[in-house]
Amino acid sequence: MTFVRQSGIQNKLLRRFPEDAFDLLAPKLQPIVLPVKHSLVLPRKPIEHVCFIGSGLASMVAESADGKSVEIRHIGREGIAGYPVLLGVDRTPNSVFMQVPGNGLQVATEDFLPILEHAELRKLLLRYVHTCELQLAYTALAAAKYNMHQRLARWLLMCHDRLDGNDLALTHEFLGLMLGVRRAGVTDELHILDGMHAIKSTRGNVRILDRDMLIEIAGGCYGVPEQEYERLIENSPQPSTLLAHLNGNRHHHML
């Protein structure tokens, strides 16, 4: 049994849990080391654990019947791997695995599901699912309407949002999976951003030099899902705080 303090947790979503819901979950959370390629969700297999990522970066990947694959979204310290269980789904055709190593806290699905009966927690988690759907929507928008170096700028910004520092340990293989192109194509697109002095690309690493320029390059395909996450989760009052505010107003009116 592991006891963790909510205030010290790296995962942003877990920090926003209502205090009483977190207290119920905390004894069931287990620390886990997440090396590169560690599988968090296997395609078409029961989702046995939900993982709150504290550091590192996971990829959700869609794969066709004939073996073609592409990354469709990132999961980092803002979210959870295994979130289909929030919608009553026990498995998914998509896979989730670590692309940048890190750590997290995981809980068995059978221990996690009963806590969803908590109304305020369920509301928070459904809001999170909404932001996941928006990220998927903007991945589709970027693929259909934006050129390759704009899409690369978007993915790099999303990685930068989820990782510490300006050095991103991203391989050409990973970037190719993000963009759905061959390694040679990745190199060409990195050279474009490198030439604009937005990044410095070396073997296995991309250094962010000018984040504002990357945002400008990405244009409208980056920002909306991120703003929605900030509005609905990061900046929303925690239920305990909201309840205290309401009780304070009620006491004031009674006086």
Image (spheres, grey):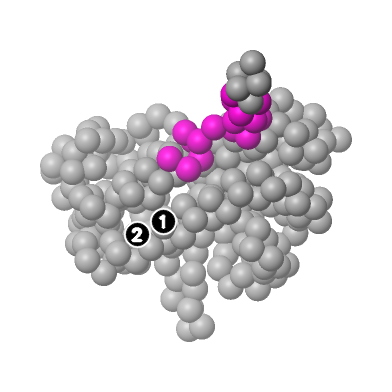
The relative height of residue 39 versus residue 89 in the rendered view (above or below) is above
Residue denoted by label 2:
138
Residue 100 x %, y %? 50, 45
Which residue of the protein is positioned furthest toward the top in this rendering? 255
Residue range of the region highlighted in magenta in the rendering: 231-249
Left or right position of 186 against 102:
left
Residue 105 occupies quadrant: top right
Contact between labelled residues 2 and 1, with CB atoms less than 8 Å apart: yes
Residue denoted by label 1:
135
The relative height of residue 74 versus residue 24 in the rendered view (above or below) is below
Residue 246 x %, y %? 61, 28
- The N terminus is located in which quarter? top right
- Amino acid type, label 1: Gln
Left or right position of 142 against 103:
left
- Amino acid type, label 2: Tyr
Tell me if I can see residue 11 in this picture. Answer: no
Disc 2 secondary structure class: helix
